[in-house]
Image: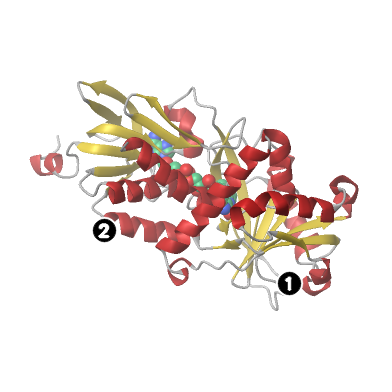
Amino acid sequence: MISVWEKETFYAPQDIIIVGSGFVGLWSAFYLKKRNPKLKITIVDRGIIPTGASTRNAGFACFGSLTELLADEQRVGSDKMLELVNMRYQGLGKIRNTFSKKEIDMDMCGGYELFTKKEDNLTGDLEQQIDYLNVLLREIVKKKTFKLADKKISSLGFNHVTHLIRNNLEGYLHSGKLLNALLYKIRMQGVQVLNNIEIKKFEKINDAFEIETNQNVSLSAKQLLICINGFAKQLIPDLDVEPARGQVLLTSPVNGLPWKGTFHYQQGYYYFRNLGDRVLLGGARNLALNEEKTFSLETTDIIQNELERFLKDVVLPGKKFTIENRWSGTMGIGSEKMPILKEISPAVFCCVRMSGMGVALAPVLGEKAARLMTA
Ligand SMILES: Cc1cc2nc3c(=O)[nH]c(=O)nc-3n(C[C@H](O)[C@H](O)[C@H](O)COP(=O)(O)OP(=O)(O)OC[C@H]3O[C@@H](n4cnc5c(N)ncnc54)[C@H](O)[C@@H]3O)c2cc1C
């Protein structure tokens, strides 16, 4: 049995319980408190620390690469593609306005997309595509986004690269530091964060939800916000959200690393960046799309071997390094890339399906969720 002190403080009835303390849950709490500082809010996470994608990603302050945006446009049309870009762009602005660069190691140092011979006959006229997208994007960013940067190829030390496209609007940050800074900020706002508690189900009784957990405690709140992204199906089976494992590796420091920034390859399926003088490389999920639809956090030989091959063959040819770390995380994807933010039943809201872009999307989605819940 819990004590009266526990019952009347940590487990006291709340106005809002947010399930999931990744970026989306945290930004939502931040904006909810900004809109109404009196709201009693608790965030509950089943991990000892947040254990979804937010602590396991690559830390790209991502805008999107040329081929990724063109592929999105083909799939969903110009308007939706631009809406997503706009949310990412606004999201990055909100991160910059909320935290100092130093706090979260944010550096909008620019990024590149690279092409090898393999893509030469698939990509068509790059300059034409750059001009086309720059015109569409000008509405959002008010300046030129992409430019051909082939002259830089020889200075970056890559192998097999035939073209490079520069994007000045991208950069990176330290995801662990951002998450920690957000946690600190919302605690200062009076939000309670409870870890190691898994929400199992919830039921409306009179005007509040009784929430069943895997611990010997039950919680209650007037409203619920579910921010569990790739795990959404575990709590709301009908949602169009599947888990998608993303795998990553990190090298040892590379002596004389000749480049800095974020890099994309093959519509963003491969991505890498420097972390100081180490290289963080991830992706290759397109090699095993079905196997990667999993909640498992194992890494696999097929993906890790391909990442290593790409590293040795294209990114760091002739350089000495070892692999210091390998890990994976769970993204939330579905039949389309647009996030799901909606009231799924009276007073139960969800904000999920970040489609591998949640670092940048979360501040905007969090603000939208707060607006929806306090309208
Ligand atoms: C390898 C990898 C690389 C990525 N790289 C980038 C990148 O460079 N840039 C970018 O913008 N995005 C990137 N992403 C995607 C980005 O990390 C995610 O979109 C974002 O972190 C999602 O945040 P979230 O808050 O929606 O979900 P999550 O961070 O997944 O948080 C969900 C939380 O819910 C908790 N939870 C789940 N079920 C329950 C339950 N029943 N009860 C209680 N708690 C529960 C989990 O423990 C977890 O902490 C990457 C993702 C991966 C996996």
Q: In this view, does 102 lie to the left or right of 355?
A: left
Q: Label 2 is placed on what type of residue? A: Met
Residue denoted by label 1? 320
Q: In this view, does 227 lie to the left or right of 131?
A: left
Mark 1 within 8 Å of ligand 1, using the beta carbon:
no
Residue 29 visible in the displayed image: yes
Q: Which residue lies furthest to the left in this view?
A: 4
Q: Which residue is drawn at 87% across and 51% down?
A: 125
Quick one: 67 or 5, which is closer to the camera?
A: 67
Q: Which residue is drawn at 24% across and 27% down?
A: 210
Q: Label 1 is placed on what type of residue? A: Lys
Quarter of the image containing the C terminus?
top left
Q: Against 223, is 50 above or below?
A: below
Q: Residue 53 placed where, x, y %? A: 51, 47
Q: Residue 149 placed where, x, y %? A: 79, 66
Displayed quadrant of residue 236:
top left
Secondary structure category for the residue under label 2: helix
Residue 57 visible in the displayed image: no
Mark 2 or 1 closer to N-term? Answer: 2
Q: Residue 6 placed where, x, y %? A: 14, 43
Mark 2 and mark 1 residues within 8 Å of each other at the beta carbon: no
Quarter of the image containing the N terminus?
top left
Q: Which residue is drawn at 68% across and 55% down?
A: 271
Q: Residue 95 placed where, x, y %? A: 46, 59
Mark 2 within 8 Å of ligand 1, using the beta carbon:
no
Res 188 label: 2
